[in-house]
């Protein structure tokens, strides 16, 4: 995807998003915040974001057990394969997890979750990507 971007001198520059990169930061870029209840006892896709810019994203999500005592599990996947750390909690209030992970353009950034007791769901919410977008080798002056 191509976009136009003004410079400080007022000259419009052209850049190609495929040549940009992302670095982890606290700048929110994408979110899938809805609360999702997962009753399955095996890893099940709960959320998904299609990546548009190559680089390392800061990925955050919240996980908790609907009922304290049951264990809720979650893990970040890339294109259907486990990628991030496996997380687990028995907390009945949201616990925020953060990881800085590399993704390529068009990768599916996914959050899978499950519970150890099908009567008490794992709950995930606030699946978010944070980063600074850097325009690398991408500027060409338009006349």
Image (tube, helix red, strand yellow):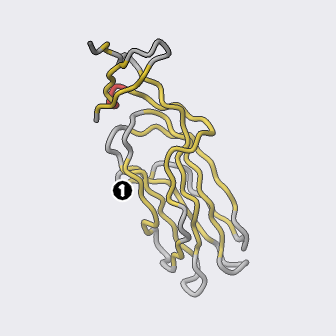
Q: Position of residue 126 (x, y in %)?
A: 58, 60
Q: Is residue 98 above or below residue 61?
A: above
Could you tell me which residue is drawn at 26 percent across and 12 percent down? 143
How many numbered circles does the render carry? 1
Residue farthest to the bottom, as pictured:
119
Which of the two residues, 31 or 118, is positioned nearer the viewer here? 31
Q: Position of residue 69 (x, y in %)?
A: 72, 78
Q: Is residue 74 found left or right of 108 in the rendered image?
A: right
Q: Is residue 45 above or below residue 143?
A: below
Q: Quadrant of the N terminus?
A: top left
Which of the two residues, 78 or 57, is positioned nearer the viewer here? 57
Q: Is residue 93 found left or right of 139 in the rendered image?
A: right
Residue 66: image quadrant is bottom right
Q: Is residue 75 above or below residue 73?
A: above
Q: Position of residue 25 (x, y in %)?
A: 60, 35
Residue 61: image quadrant is bottom right
Could you tell me which residue is drawn at 49 percent across and 49 percent down? 30
Residue 47: image quadrant is bottom left
Could you tell me which residue is drawn at 46 percent across and 48 percent down? 83
Q: Which residue is mark 1?
A: 80
Q: Position of residue 81 (x, y in %)?
A: 38, 53
Element on which disc 1 rests: loop
Q: Is residue 94 found left or right of 14 in the rendered image?
A: right
Residue farthest to the front, as pictured:
10
Could you tell me which residue is drawn at 56 percent across and 56 percent down? 86
Q: Is residue 127 above or below residue 59?
A: below
């Amino acid at each position: 995807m191509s976009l136009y971007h003004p410079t400080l001198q007022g000259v419009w520059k052209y850049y190609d998003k495929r040549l940009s990169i992302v670095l982890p930061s606290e700048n929110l870029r994408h979110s899938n915040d809805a609360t999702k209840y997962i009753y399955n006892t095996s890893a099940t896709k709960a959320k998904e974001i299609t990546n548009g810019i190559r680089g390392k994203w800061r990925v955050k999500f919240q996980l908790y057990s609907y009922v304290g005592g049951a264990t809720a599990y979650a893990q970040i996947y890339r294109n259907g394969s486990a990628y991030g750390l496996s997380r687990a909690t028995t907390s009945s209030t949201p616990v925020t997890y953060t990881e800085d992970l590399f993704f390529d353009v068009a990768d599916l950034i996914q959050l899978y979750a499950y519970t150890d007791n099908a009567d008490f769901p794992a709950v995930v919410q606030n699946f978010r990507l944070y980063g600074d977008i850097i325009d690398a080798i991408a500027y060409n002056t338009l006349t």
